[in-house]
Amino acid sequence: MTDLLFRKLQRRDRRLSEAEEKVLAAAVSHHIEVEADVEVVRQDEISQQSLLLEQGWACRYASLPDGRRQILSIHVPGDFVDLQSFPLKRMDHTVATLTRCRIAVYPHANLRKITEQFPHLTRMLWLTTLIDAAILRQWLLGSGQRSALERAAHLLCELRSRLDVVGEVAGETFDLPLTQAELGETLGISQVHANRVVGALRNRRLVTWRDEKVRILDWPGLQELAAFDPVYLALESMER
Amino acid sequence: MTDLLFRKLQRRDRRLSEAEEKVLAAAVSHHIEVEADVEVVRQDEISQQSLLLEQGWACRYASLPDGRRQILSIHVPGDFVDLQSFPLKRMDHTVATLTRCRIAVYPHANLRKITEQFPHLTRMLWLTTLIDAAILRQWLLGSGQRSALERAAHLLCELRSRLDVVGEVAGETFDLPLTQAELGETLGISQVHANRVVGALRNRRLVTWRDEKVRILDWPGLQELAAFDPVYLALESMER
DNA sequence: CGCTGCGTTGAGACTACTCAATATCCGTGG
DNA sequence: CCACGGATATTGAGTAGTCTCAACGCAGCG
């Protein structure tokens, strides 16, 4: 199932060819299955391969020497979780699974061959790392300027949009395998405050959230609160 | 002076060839001079070219509908300020000058040719966008987990390191053309609090900061306070 | 049955915010 | 040459958002 990534890329650029799909699929050396809560790539390691999430959830985080931890991104099926390690080599953060995951492994040597023979596909891979960066900028904008409640709302808007692309939203419900402690580390607030923020979203009848399942009750209201504008996710075609 | 960028890249990878230097230099269509406080690329625009800062300072920022603004990065000579617009096309944020700037213009068509003929150089350009993302991750880590004082200290550590590479640190002094209001927008705090934070750095005899000049008085102390580890800046060679 | 992990709630403390006033510097026009 | 306005920096006072500490509830599981 390189399918998911390919579908996502093709949504963005319809000129992606079947040949390119095959090249991408052929660059996978093998697949692995990993349990939940496993660190698959660690900070400071020098990486020889990049990992594509096929099933399951993962996140990246960085830590301060005293243990404070910040989740830097959340990944869903179809995401490359550490493609940046291909040009960058050394990891500046850790990648861990949130659930049991199925992962495709792309040795850097194979990616290098792609860059040498398939410039258009190379630009598309580059693009995926830049969309990651765009998401990061939104998180930074939120972290600096949005209140905790607005950030929580924004996170849900973002995830709903990203999950929708890969067909993981049923009705208005989707999985979100984060504990409230992890939500706190994502939003940059304490676990206790994360709990109150989730409570506030519920009280405003914007969402329900129980047993790792989120249901959006008021999509326009949630977007409004979050000041959410999905353009940055670059989900739509740039052609014409 | 593509020199600065090239020197920076070469510090990272000594295999960069003279041929590549020439190709990079040839991709510049022209140079422009821009006054301070000019928006050179605007949010939502579709960009046809990327800009390399040769002299002067610039920053990127994004805004919320109600006007709250977050500075997302600060750029010094030798930085590509919007290389991500080459694969991404649409800008998700604005780039503005902080001082009078000299800028080299790289039409996307020329960059595209580089990706088609110079895979190694392409990977180096990709790398520069990934270092930007690594810096962004550090800012996000700080925004979520570091106190305002620690963030301010970290920003100074980061800028000292980046400026050092391009030879803009004299003794322990460097320019920092940010008002305290802009510092607030960078750190995600109010202008008033930014002032108090700067005051605290002075009181602890870590730095002096007057007339847009910063002098570091206690480099180890500043790094300690900031929990600064320069690895993420990827300034050092990855060879061998 | 008693851990253990997760979610929930309360109370008091602290960081950073807003509003507001004052200080300083600088350029401009009278 | 001086008065003035505008931009920036500084300081004070009260407030809002978020924190820490602590306790408790509940479910799953060995």
Image: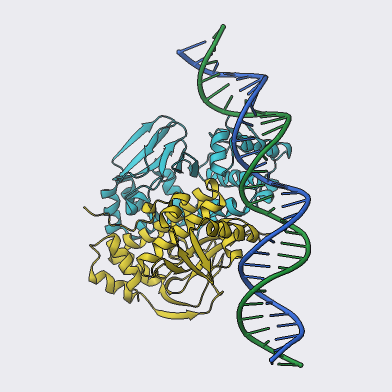
Chain colours: A cyan, B yellow, C green, D blue
Counting from the top left corner in percent of width and height, residue B187 is at 56, 56
Visible residue check, residue B70:
no
Furthest-left residue in view? B240
Q: Quadrant of the N terminus of chain B?
A: bottom left
Image coords of residue B140 (percent x, y): 51, 50
Q: Residue at x 32, y 75 (%)?
A: B25
> Is residue B122 visible to the viewer in this orientation of the structure?
yes
What x and y, as percent, mark residue D12?
73, 57
From the viewer's side, name the closer residue of C8 and C15.
C15
B219 sits to left or right of D21:
left
Does residue B133 appear left or right of residue A143 in this picture?
A: left
Q: Where is C27 relative to A173, above or below?
A: below
Snapshot quadrant of residue A54:
top left
Q: Residue at x 22, y 62 (%)?
A: B15
Relative side of B150 to B218, left or right: right
When the figure is inspected, residue A16 is found, relative to residue B209, above or below; the finding is above
The residue shown at (38%, 51%) is: A84
**Above/below status of B120 relative to C9:** below
Q: Residue B19, located in which quarter of the rendered image?
A: bottom left
In the image, residue B129 lies at what x, y percent?
A: 41, 59
Nearest the viewer among B69 and A98 is B69
Number of on-image labels: 0
Camera-side residue: B151 or A80? B151
Nearer to us in this view, A228 or B34: B34
Q: Is residue B178 left or right of residue B49?
A: right
